[in-house]
Image (cartoon, grey):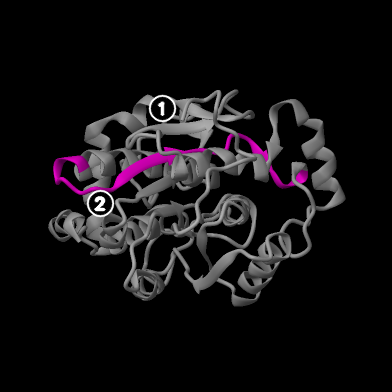
Amino acid sequence: MTPEKWDPRQLPDLTGRRFLVTGSTAGLGFFSSLQLAGAGAHVVMTGRNPNRLSTARATVLGQHPSASIETLILDTSNLGSIRSAAATARGRTGLDGLLLNAGIVHPPAARETTADGHEIVFATNVLGHFALAGELLISLAMARGRMVWVGSMSTSMWKYDPVDPELENGYTAWRAYVQSKIATTALGLEADRRLRDEGVPVGSLVAHPGYSTSGRTRGILGINEPSRRTRFFDNLQAPITQSKEHGAWPLVRALVDSDARSGSFWGPSHVATGLPHEGTAAAITRDPEIGARLWAFCAHATRTPWPYEQAARSRGR
């Protein structure tokens, strides 16, 4: 669908299609789930907290009473949680789309590690999604679906080469965040290369939300409740910021637009704000050597080899 014909407020009919969204209880994940459900899709909303998941599901149903929603506990920082959730999500049906959205946006000031021993930002934003995508690859292939990795416009501003992905040395909160997004984008593009080479009928795309803030987003009880201070300062930046709802537009377009090709990169038309359109990922994220290096690191760290051969065979099912 051409940019002129794409209307993020009027999505194509998604009835009969099934999508899983990580980090669905707030922010981009919630609004992506809301938009997908409003277009008739069956949405698997995931999150770490069952109470927040229940609230998010009820809120979607409050706006779209006939929506088809299920919830699933999933913590992307925990490899055991990922494998358990993936086993449930696979079920007996295919998966049309996987939105790899969950993540830490405000990292801790000092380096922390997960129960699996990994640096928490890299584990949550990168390793967990790498493992989940691998676990759900066959389900995606059954439906000839696609995965969308969520990047950031920060990757074009700070070109940190993630030679030390888990920042065992030189940790800072900002570097942890930006490196995780460089890795996420590089992995999304590397996945496209590998899936093509292996003949797997699954697309891999990357999308970013621009500069989307909670203070520019409508208040929703239990979902988005910014303080007055946050509202004030975010509104001071109004010319270069947008709501989380609008930030979800490129993510959703990458996930459902039939003309969005595997390996493409999507974001707001004015980088920080605007309607969703295809753009160009930062050069560092497009480097195949960096992509291959990160792939090897993640495969070893998660012990999750992607089942290419089985997924390729599933096209005939």
Tell me: 164 left or right of 211: left
Q: Is residue 247 above or below residue 3?
A: below
In the rendered image, which quarter is residue 303 located in?
bottom left
Of the residues under marks 2 and 1, which one precedes in the sequence? 1
Query: Where does residue 184 sit, x and y in percent of width and height?
Result: 39, 44
Callout 1 secondary element: loop
Residue at the (31%, 41%) spot, across then down: 163
Q: Is residue 36 above or below residue 52?
A: above
Tell me: 289 left or right of 71: left
In the rendered structure, which segment of residues is drawn in magenta? 196-215
Magenta-drawn stretch contains 202: yes
Q: Give the camera-side residue of 291 and 8.
A: 8
Residue at the (42%, 25%) spot, across then down: 280
Identify residue type, mark 2.
Phe
Image depth: mark 2 or mark 1 in front:
1
Q: Is residue 185 above or below residue 60?
A: above
Which residue is identified by label 1? 282
Identify residue type, mark 1.
Ala
Instruction: Give the crowd class for mark 1: few <14, some 14-19, many >=20 residues within 10 Å.
Output: many
Tell me: 81 left or right of 71: left
Residue at the (55%, 23%) spot, across then down: 4
- How far separated are the C-alphas under marks 2 and 1? 21 Å
Which residue is identified by label 2? 297
In the rendered image, which quarter is residue 61 located in?
bottom right
Query: Where does residue 40 sit, x and y in percent of width and height?
Result: 56, 56
How many numbered marks, from 0 up? 2
